[in-house]
Each structure stands twice: as C-alpha cells, then as structure tokens.
Image (cartoon, rainbow, N blue to C red):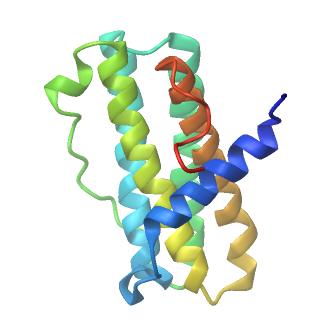
C-alpha cells in the first residue's frame, strides 16, 4: 500500500487534534497567537543550534530553520491583523541533552513540533478571524510535514500511532 504525502500530513494533523483536546479559551485569538509565536521562535532557535552543533543534516536543518523563520513572520502578521503588536519572546536554548546527537535532537524537535501543531489545531478550532484560517492552517500543515521529516530521521513510522 502506498501512502501519499497528503495522507501523511492529514494523519499527523488528526493525531495532533486528538492530543489537543477541547479548545481552551486562552488559546483563542491574539493570546493563542502569542503562544504560537513563542513556540515558532523556539523551533527556529533549536534548528539553528542543531546546525551549529552538527546534530542535524545540514540540508534538512537549513530547510526547517528557514521555514520556521517564515512561520514566525506569518504569526507576527496574524497578530498585527488582530491589532496586537508582536512581542519578541525570550527563547530558551535547547537542553544540552537535546543536542547530544542526531537522534536526541530529532526526538526533541519532534516533540516541540508536535506541541506546536497541536497549538495550531487548538487555536484554529476557536478562531473567529476567517481571513487568518488559511495562512495559519498552512503553517500548521508545514509543521506536520516537519513531524514527518523528523520521524524519517528517527526511522519511525511516518504516521503517528493512532493517526
């Protein structure tokens, strides 16, 4: 049986939605976007650190880091659309153990990507800003693709268990 990229992404998003549970009030609107902005900054920083330490394939790391920069900008624009000035969150560097090697970093990044995709699922479920649904959904889908790439690095099934 052949699995298409669309099926893999749909399964990853579905699994994230199941983990997100019911939408919480604090994850809607600008507050939810602020949380996602912090996660996107953290991912961008993590991929840069992984590149600096040589614990990610350079081509993959550069691609993911660049996409995270685009995600940061997209979330900033969404915040501005809702009338809030984006903040520059303090970003914690990855724990030393996360940078111990390629498998350790891939597990760390996969966990963070999963948390981020779940955050988008949660936000989009309650967002009352139709003009933002498509761009934020696109960022969420990109995050799900990142999960697939990291699962491949870890030689894990490309679909999350239960997905």
Name the residue rendered at 46%, 81% in the picture: 22
- Residue found at x 60% / y 26%: 63
Placement of 135 over or under 53, stated as above or below = below
At horizontal 43% and vertical 63% (from top left) the residue drawn is: 36
Q: What x and y, as percent, mark residue 56?
A: 43, 15
- Vertical arrangement, residue 157 with respect to residue 72, above or below: above
Q: Quadrant of residue 4?
A: top right
In the image, residue 24 sits, relative to residue 58, either above or below, namely below
Residue that protrudes farthest toward the left in the picture: 96
From this view, report whether residue 45 is shown above or below residue 51: below
Count up the numbered dots.
0
Q: Residue at x 47, y 83 (%)?
A: 28
Q: Quadrant of the N terminus?
A: top right
Q: What x and y, as percent, mark residue 115?
A: 40, 54
In-image side of 1 versus 80 (left or right): right
Q: Nearer the viewer, residue 21 or 46?
A: 21
User: Is 134 on the left or on the right of 60, as rendered?
Assistant: right
- Depth check: give the residue in front, 60 or 108: 108
Q: Which is nearer the eye, 73 or 120?
A: 120
Locate residue 63 relative to residue 103 in the image: left or right. right
Give residue 113's position: percent from left, percent from top.
45, 45
Relative to 163, 85 lies left or right = left
* Quarter occupied by residue 97: top left
Q: Position of residue 48 (x, y in %)?
A: 39, 27
């Amino acid at each position: 049986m052949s699995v298409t990229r669309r099926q893999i992404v749909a399964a990853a998003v579905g699994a994230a939605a199941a983990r997100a549970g019911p939408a919480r009030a604090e994850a809607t609107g600008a507050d939810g976007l602020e949380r996602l902005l912090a996660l996107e900054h953290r991912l961008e920083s993590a991929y840069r650190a992984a590149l600096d330490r040589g614990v990610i394939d350079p081509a993959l790391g550069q691609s993911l880091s660049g996409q995270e920069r685009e995600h940061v900008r997209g979330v900033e624009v969404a915040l501005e659309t809702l009338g809030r000035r984006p903040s520059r969150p303090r970003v914690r560097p990855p724990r030393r153990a996360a940078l111990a090697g390629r498998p350790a970093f891939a597990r760390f990044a996969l966990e963070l990507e999963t948390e981020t995709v779940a955050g988008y699922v949660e936000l989009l479920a309650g967002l009352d800003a139709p003009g933002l649904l498509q761009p934020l959904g696109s960022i969420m889908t990109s995050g799900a693709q990142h999960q697939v790439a990291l699962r491949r690095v870890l030689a894990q099934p490309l679909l999350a268990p239960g997905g």
